């Protein structure tokens, strides 16, 4: 699953560490999600979208490779 977390972090001037702290996960988790190596739980995906004040579809999307 693709995502725009890095874009939203940049828009809000947030580091991976700062977002990880807000989401109560490790920086490595945020890094893995951003790189597409790990798909977050539905709960975490909604939490990230809610944090940025956008719909989940604006942050996460499926792209056929």
Image (cartoon, rainbow, N blue to C red):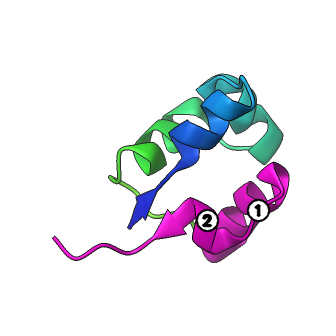
Which residue is label 2 attached to?
Answer: 58
**Quadrant hosting residue 24:** top right
**Farthest-out residue, left:** 65
Q: Look at the picture and state if 24 lies above or below 63.
A: above
Report crowding for label 2: few under 14, some 14 to 19, many 20 or more residues within 10 A (C-alpha).
some
Q: Which residues are magenta?
A: 42-65
Residue 10 lies, in percent from the top left, at 62, 29
Q: Is residue 48 magenta?
A: yes
Q: Is residue 34 left or right of residue 58?
A: left
Residue under the image location 69 percent in, 36 percent down: 20
Q: Look at the picture and state if 20 lies above or below 47.
A: above
Residue under the image location 51 percent in, 51 percent down: 4
Report crowding for label 1: few under 14, some 14 to 19, many 20 or more residues within 10 A (C-alpha).
few
Q: Look at the picture and state if 65 lies above or below 26.
A: below
| Pick the front one: 48 or 28 | 48
**Quadrant hosting residue 12:** top right
Callout 2 touching callout 1 (CB < 8 Å): yes
Residue 33 lies, in percent from the top left, at 46, 50
Residue 26 lies, in percent from the top left, at 61, 36
Residue under the image location 40 percent in, 57 percent down: 38
User: Which label was assigned to residue 54?
Assistant: 1
């Amino acid at each position: 699953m693709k995502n725009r977390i890095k874009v939203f972090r940049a828009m809000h001037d947030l580091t991976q560490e700062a977002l990880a702290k807000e989401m109560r996960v490790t920086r490595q988790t945020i890094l893995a999600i951003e790189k597409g190596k790990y798909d977050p739980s539905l709960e975490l995906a909604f939490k990230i979208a809610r944090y940025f004040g956008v719909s989940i579809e604006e942050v996460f999307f499926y792209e056929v490779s």
